[in-house]
Structures are given as structure tokens and as C-alpha cells.
Amino acid sequence: MRFIQILCGAGIGLLLTIPCVFSAENSVPSPLHPFETRSWTIPENSIDLLVFPLLQSHGIEPSLPSSDEIFIRRAYLDIIGTLPSPAETLAFLANQSEDKRISLIDTLLSREEFADYWSLKWADILRMKAEFPINLWPNAVQAYHRWVRDAIRNNMPYDQFVRALLTSNGSNFRVPEVNFYRAVQTRTPSSLASAAALTFMGSRMKQWEEKKQTGCALFFSRISYKKSAEWKEEIVLCNPAPATSTNAILPDGKSITIPADQDPRIIFADWLISPQNPWFAKNIVNRVWFWLMGSPIIEGIDDIRPDNPPSNPELLAFLEKELVSSGYNLRHLYRLILTSRTWQQSSIPQSSHPKARSLFAYYPVRRVEAEVLRDALFTIGKRGEEYMSPIPEPYTFVPEEQKNVLLADGSITSPFLELFGRPPRDTGLESERNNTISDSQERYMLASTDIQRIITRSPLLQRIIRTARNRRDEIIRNYYLFILSRYPTEEEALIAAQYFQKPKLRIKEAADDLAWVLINSKEFLYRH
Amino acid sequence: MSILNQKERRDKKQKQPTFMRTQPRCGMIRTTKILQQAAVGGSLLLFALSPIHAQEKSATDPSHASAVIQIWLWGGPSHLDTFDPKPEAGSDFCGPFTKPIETNVPGIWINELLPNLAKQADKYSLIRSMTHGINGHETAAYLMQTGHSSSEEAVYPGIGAVVSLFKGYDHGYTGTIPPYVILTTPQGRFSEVGFLASKYKPFVTGGDPNQARFSVEGITVEGLSEERTLARKNLLESLETFGKALSSNQEFIRFDKSRQQAYSILFGDTAKIFDLSQETDLLRNRYGKNKFGQCCLMARRLIEDGVRYVTINYSGWDTHGQHFESMRKKLPELDNGVSALLQDLSDRNLLDRTILLVGGEFGRTPKIDWEKPWNGGRGHYGKCFSVLIAGGGFKGGIVVGASDATGENVQQRPVYPQDLLASIYLRLGINPDAILPTPQNRDLRVLPPPTKTSPRNILLEIMP
């Protein structure tokens, strides 16, 4: 414990935090091996210049730099949603170059898995689901997902991405982005406007004044849906305009006359994606920051409103400006955040100040998302869930080895993903995803035949045992490396070695027990 | 196995709204109508003063039912081939099942392959006038389980999650097994909790209770001794290096609580509840030595332990093809399982407090499809179907409503999903108009409010 908390006046409940290790080394806390390191190897970037001074002005001590072991695991999980392989980890740890962290970030940002993982986030907020209540239908979900994944892979400028989603016409199978207007429970103009506001403005339309709600719905009032001769094909298009023009109201309150010959969605989209728009850039930078940092700049994430101020307004404004001036280059935004010291801090806080989290004084731990967790378990045990649809629409078959982050359709039945908080994709709210631990999740991790079989039947763990040829310390080292992306500390190696000495316990059994322990450790289950 | 003709599906989907519009919801029979109005009045009065007070009262009111076993016949069972036989409608309707049997309640006849259920008709009632007009699995299932139309702007929780909300851990439930359990696989067509917090989600057992050992995910691990489990626990505690570095983290404190809770189940007596070898062979055989039969027995054990809501997800009723072959296989299973459950619950004095509900999302087309590729199959049919209800105070030996001569239309006393659900909620002491907690504090209720065009006609005929 480097800090003690003193309660002064229990009635007032005032919390005072006093560093208790004032020492000759100028109160610099010593790094906790193997999770932290003493000094930064990367320069401060422009984000840090906005984060650390604010922390200092609140008297909040930021965390220490994360160690290389922590960094590589975090980088893989956060950027591409997978664990680093043992070879990748060893190569990175052995690399002596100064800029190895930045070059790893660049490598990961250009990997195919980057698009896989981030299409999962978009599939959530765009509500990609074949069945009730969204009812996109399986073929349309696949087409839609592929379109989004391609856009991410090709780093399509964000403003164009949104404009395409909002203004396209055509078949749900052939112009997949039109599915934006199909992915709602009720296809009323107000419900479509509400979906656009939530997704791209981070704003809850129901909180607007009545006049704005009805005025904004008019931009979406000419969308219509037509069946074709093909089974479940649907054409989304803009209805022919009425002879006269209509008066609509933009979310900022401005009245606008929609000329008779114009598609009102285009007027809305062009207003939305203009650099001056007060919501557009703010919403996406806040989301991306939350996705990477685990804590948003504006609390509530998709509840941006005047009475919900950002925790660090300068930081938010800076990120918005960066996004706009980069030509809405999302990967530029990712890189900016990832190469900051702010993101690379240790997850062990140095301060228990109530604002430490919201002002980004440490990297907060979060349970790994359901899909990423299942994929990590598959990496270890080569055991997954298989799925076959019960009805032909057409028959959907998902093989065991399919990556879970790449599941396009939120209605694929999966007891595991369901248990671990996969969002139902009914509303597109960020809060639909639940990454907090529950009793039933813990029960499953501790006592299920599924987890037991992942361990006992893993060909990769068995290979480690074979290659180690009964050398227990080798098994222990390689299990740590494979499961936790680091070697054990001396103390850990000793404890594990003692366990292997237990009478009547075969090596394979002891190894299984160790794998079970590592998979059940918080270090495995959490991003940290 | 269900193979659906594309055209057929499309036709049905298009037909459904027309039916909803043209079928008036009231004006069936004068006498029942008076009863119905009284019912609405009564239910409103019951909760008019203070819904919160009503809920608190319900927790201790011994006159209420305390648990539900829902046998969910996934896919939609044929009403004609189960609880509403029509031997006089001719072979195009009744197929080979021409000899229904009379039950121990004179005048109530059911399918000939349900002889054990026929001996117990005094314990249950049959609703032969269920209707909603929807022929799509997911939307019909959603309506049957939530009472809400799929076109409302929210995804409502199913009845199991609502019971878990009002009768679970927030309201005095202390069991180690979660209050809402599904045997053995989730329904999967819609999220059971809807917009409710995930803590009201069902506990899905996985496994098969008809195996030598019922392996329940999160309760028992195949091939692992208690000694090894304990050794693992100790090793984990001494190797939790990162967790210890963050021991004051709120998330980790919560995590540790969950872990302790999980261990208390692992090393406690909970696993014994899932150990069917504690039952006699005689009883196990009476339930039927198949997955469904043993699920019924398992449901009784769970109810006995205090679990509030058990769903048995019993699939295989979506019989578009090979319908009659399937019925010959499934009806005896259903007959043994449900009749043994009724008898067993009754013998243990559990039936008075446990509601038993048997039915699916809809019925099946009364007119048999003899053409290829169905060769004697039945399609989806939401216009008229049957449900069996027993226990928890519901009277037995009564037939509610009636279908017409061919079972194609409701002839008397239509019962809509919300009528059935409201009746069950009232028996459980749950206010059907209670507000459900939503993240945005929206005004969303357990059931849609009764209106003139859509009154709430609770099942006064069979309520105490």
C-alpha cells in the first residue's frame, strides 16, 4: 500500500489521501514488478499535455508507465481484440529499439484483425441482427457487416462513412449501407431520426423539445421500403417529393425548407457532417476514447447534452479538431490515443482521488468483452461453440473455429456470449453491452465442463508439456507466457513448482490445474 | 426438422395483419363479457391504491402462488392433436387421430396418445380459445412470453424475467440457485430479459438430466474431484498476483464477492439438487427416461428448493413435415412427463403454490397439408390454439373458451396472450401494471394497459 486513507469526521465522510512513503527519492513510487516500469520510453504527446497538467492541478498523481509485458497484451487486446502469441510476445520483449511500442501500434493498426475487431463495435451500435426486434434477415446482415468491415479496413473517412449510411438508396443485399434504415424496431420517421441522433450525435432524441423532435423526423419522412421478386430483398428509397416544399427543424433549432425536388436525408446528412456541427465529431471522438481508455470524456457516452459536461473539455476539443483536420481519419485518432502516455499508463492507480478515473490518471481495468474472451479461450483450447439455425432463412451454420468478434449476426444463439454480456443489439445504446462480472459468470469460469475441456483437451497446452519433457519449470514458464503473455515472477514460479510436487498428482493434472488458475486469474479475465 | 416453403412463409406474414384488423376483440358471448368486465374492474381495484404496497403484501400473502413451471413447446404444437381433438371434422383435419379419449372429467376429451393426462383432467384446465393471429415464431413467442406486440418501441422482458425481478433477490429470495432457471437450453429467438438488467437473466443449465450425471455448467465439472477443486482454489489464491496489486479496486471487490458466492455453491449442497440419482427409479421411470421427462422431474426438484420460475424448453414441435410420425413419438413423452409432474407436485402439496403452464407460441394449421413436400404436415397457426394451465390456485377440470368445428377459429371467449399472462401475474401477486425499471426511466409496464379495443379479460372462470 503506497497510500493510506484517513477518514476525518465519520459524519462528514471526508476522504483524505496522504502519500505515506515520502522518501529520499522524492516520493517517486517504486514500480510494481512485473506490471510497471520506472521511466517512459515514449515521448509525451499532445494528449498528455492536456491530461497531465489537469491531473496535477487537482493534485492527482498519475500512474507509472506500464511494463512492456502489460503493454503488449493491452495493445493486442485493445487494437485487434486478440492475445499476442508467445512468439510475438518474446520478440517484442527482446526488441531493444526505442520506438518499439510505436512501431507495434502501427503494425497492429494495419492488421486484418483490426477491421475484424472494430466491426464488432460498429455492429453493436448499428444494431446488426437478423431477427426480432431488428429483423434485418441473415443475408442482409452479412452484406451489411461486410460493408462496414471493408470501410474500417480501408479506413474510409468517417464523414463519408456516415453520409453513405444516411443517404444511400437501393437493395438491402446489393447496397448494404441502406440497412441503416432497416435496423430499427419500428420504421417510423421519428424512430429513424432517433436512431441517427443516437448513433452519430450521441444524443437521445426523446430529451429534445417536442418541436425539434417532430421537426427533425421530417428529414426521415420520405424513406420508403419496397419488396422485390427476390426472397426478403427490400429496396430502401426516397419517396417522390410532394409538390410543395416542407419546413423541417434541425437538431440545433434551425428551421429549414426542404425544396420539393430534394431528398431531405441529404440536407440532414450534410448538416450533420459539416466541421461546425456541435455533435458529430464530439460523439465519435468521445466513443473512440471510451473504447480505448475504458472511461469516456463525456459520461454516459451516448448521452451528450449541455448539462452533461466533459471531464476534460480541452482534451475533447483537441481531439475533435484533430479528427476534422485529418480529414475524418479515424485511424489517425486511434494512433494519437494509443501513442500517448495517458493510454500507456499502468492500471494500478497512484491516487484514490474521486476524479482519478474520469480525469484519466490510470488505465482502468475492464473485463474482456464476451466475444474477445471466447476467442482468447479458443486460442488456448481450440474449443468453441458451434451454431446451426433451426429454420431455413437460409440455414446458417457457424463452425466452431469462427472468430466470435466476426459474428455478423447478433441473433446467433450462444449461451457463452449471452452469459458474458453480449449486447442484444436492440437499441444501439452503448450500455447494452455489459462487461461487469456476475455470480453466474464466475460460476461458469470456476465450474463448467466447457472450461475444463478447454484446458484438458487443448492440443497447444499438451504440446507445451511434450516439448518440456517433464521439466516442470519449463511447463510453468510456457503456460504463463501462453496464457498471460509474460513469464512468471520468481515467487510465482516457486509456488507453482511446489504445486507440481504434490503427491499423487500427475504432471498433466498439475499442468491442467495451473492453466485453470491462470485462466481464472483477474489478469487473464481483465484488460489491464 | 422444419422446412418452410418460402411462399408459404411470405403468405402467412402478409395474412397476419389483416386478421388482426378484421377480427374484433370483443362481442363474443354476452355472459362471458360481463364476467370479463368485472375482471378488469377487479384487477384494477386490486392495485389502484398503491402498487408498491400491493407488491409488498404479495410477498407474504399465502393465498398467492409462488412459482411457475413453464413447459414451452417450442415450434408450436398442434392443438387438434393434443388438447382440442376434432374427430368429426374428417381426416383432412384429424388425420389418423380419430379416437380421442375421455378424461376423468366427463365431457373433456383429449388426444388418444395422452392417456395419463386423461386421468388427471381434474387437476388442470384447458384454454381452447387462445389467439393472437401471428404466424412467425419469434414474434409469436415474444407476444406469448411478454404480452406485448413486437411493434412497440421497446423490447420487453419475458414473464420469467419479470418474475425474477419481482420475486427474486430484490424481494426476499435467498436461494443459491438463481430464481429463474431454464432447462436446458435458452430459447434463443429473443433476449429473455429485454431491457431489464442482466441480473434477471435466466440461469441456463446446459447438459442433459437423462445422462448418468446431469452436468450443469457452473455447478458441476465433469471428472473433477472436490479435492482437486479445493487445491485449484488455494493455488489460485496464492497466484492472484495482479488481483492483489489492485485489491482495493471496486470492480475487483465485486469480482471477489461473485467468486465467493460461486465457491459456496461449488462446495455446498447445491449440486445435490441437480443429482437425480437421489430419486427412486420408480419415480424416474414414471416421468419417462428421456430428456424431457427428466427435465420435468428436475423442475419439481428446483421448485421444491424455492426456485421461482422454471422453463423447460422442449423443442421439436415445429412439424411441417412428418407431423404424425413426430406426434407418435412426442405425445407419449409429453404425456408421461406432464402427468407425472402433476401427480408429483400434487402428492407433495406443491401444486397449490406452483402454476404449471404447457403450450407453445401458436398452434398448427388444422387442415393437414397432404401435398409434397409436406406429405401430411401442419403449418404455423396463431389464430386459434390451446394451452394447458394448472396449479397455483387455478381451478382444474374446466375448459375455457371453444374453437369451431374444425379448430380453425375461436368460437367462444377468445383468450389473448395478455389475458393469460395477466391472470398468472395476479395469481403470483405481481401487479400487471407495475412500472418496469429502464435505464432511461421510461414509463414501461409489465403488460400493456387495458383499453376499450383491447380489454384485459383475466381468466376469472378458473381463478379462485
Image (spheres, rainbow, N blue to C red):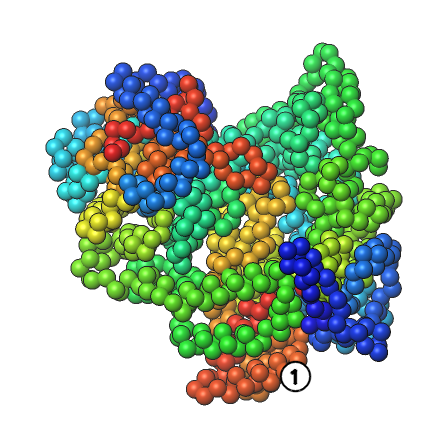
- Residue B437 in sight in this render: yes
Q: Give the side of residue A258 with respect to residue B226, left or right.
A: right
Left or right placement of residue A273 versus residue A372 in this view: right
Q: Is residue A506 left or right of residue B290?
A: right
Instruction: Tell me residue A518's x, y (percent).
Output: 57, 72
Picture coordinates of residue B408, whole percent (x, y): 30, 25
Residue B100, horizontal then vertical, whole percent = 16, 35
Q: Residue at x 73, y 11 (%)?
A: A244
Residue in view at x 17 percent, y 45 percent = B116
Residue B236, image x and y in percent?
54, 74
Identify the image quadrant of the C terminus of chain A.
bottom right
Relative vertical location of residue B219 with respect to residue B356 in this rendering, above or below: below
Nearest the camera: A80 or A197?
Answer: A197
Q: Find numbered disc 1 in the image and state the secondary structure of the residue it sits on.
A: helix
Neighbours of disc 1 within 10 Å: few (<14), some (14-19), many (20+): few
What is the quadrant of residue A514 in the picture? bottom right
Q: Residue at x 80, y 49 (%)?
A: A312
